[in-house]
Amino acid sequence: MPIDATLPYDDQNVFAKILRGEIPNRTVYEDEWALAFHDIAPAAPVHVLVIPKGAYVGWDDFSAQAGAEEIAGFVRAVGHVARTLGLVEPGYRLLANLGRNGGQEVPHLHVHLFGGGPLGPMLSR
Ligand code: AMP
């Protein structure tokens, strides 16, 4: 069920629980600003989620309210993870879903990092 990205942050969401260590995850990378872990239901040979450590519902509140250091830290973490996984030369896709039309299911900002093979058209037709 897609979420309403205008609602306040819910600290009981599954990624908040992962950040607090209450739910296990397969961590790929972690630093001060971000955590990257394998998606539980991969949609590509490589499917990693990168989330900021701060409490943001999605791209909207993050882009409007996060500090410059937080934004830089998160963006750099995404790039670092892609490089570390060897995805730059073969190429990869980044995706951030927001709200109902975006099909966002988890109300904590996450970027999907897809790779490991040709990813097909950008959107299903
Ligand atoms: P979205 O539709 O953009 O909100 O994507 C949410 C993603 O989170 C989906 O690809 C799910 O497979 C993934 N997901 C949900 N719960 C977990 C979990 N506990 N660990 C890893 N990935 C998860």
Image (tube, rainbow, N blue to C red):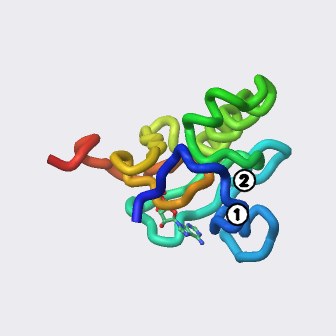
The spot of residue 85 in percent (x, y) is 59, 50
Q: Identify the residue under disc 2.
A: 35
Q: Say which amino acid is labelled 1.
A: Thr
Picture quadrant of residue 59:
top right
Going 28% across and 41% down the picture, which residue do you hit?
122
Picture quadrant of residue 65:
top right
Going 45% across and 71% down the picture, which residue do you hit?
41
Q: Is residue 69 left or right of residue 109?
A: right
Q: Is residue 122 left or right of residue 4?
A: left
Give the label, 2 or 1, closer to the camera.
2
Q: Identify the residue under disc 1.
A: 27
Q: Earlier in the sequence, mark 2 or mark 1?
A: 1
The spot of residue 100 in percent (x, y) is 38, 50
The spot of residue 123 in percent (x, y) is 25, 44
Disc on res. 123? none
Q: Say which amino acid is labelled 2.
A: Leu
Q: Are marks 2 and 1 in contact (CB under 8 Å)?
A: yes
| Residue 118 at least partly seen | yes
For numbered disc 1, what is the local secondary structure? strand
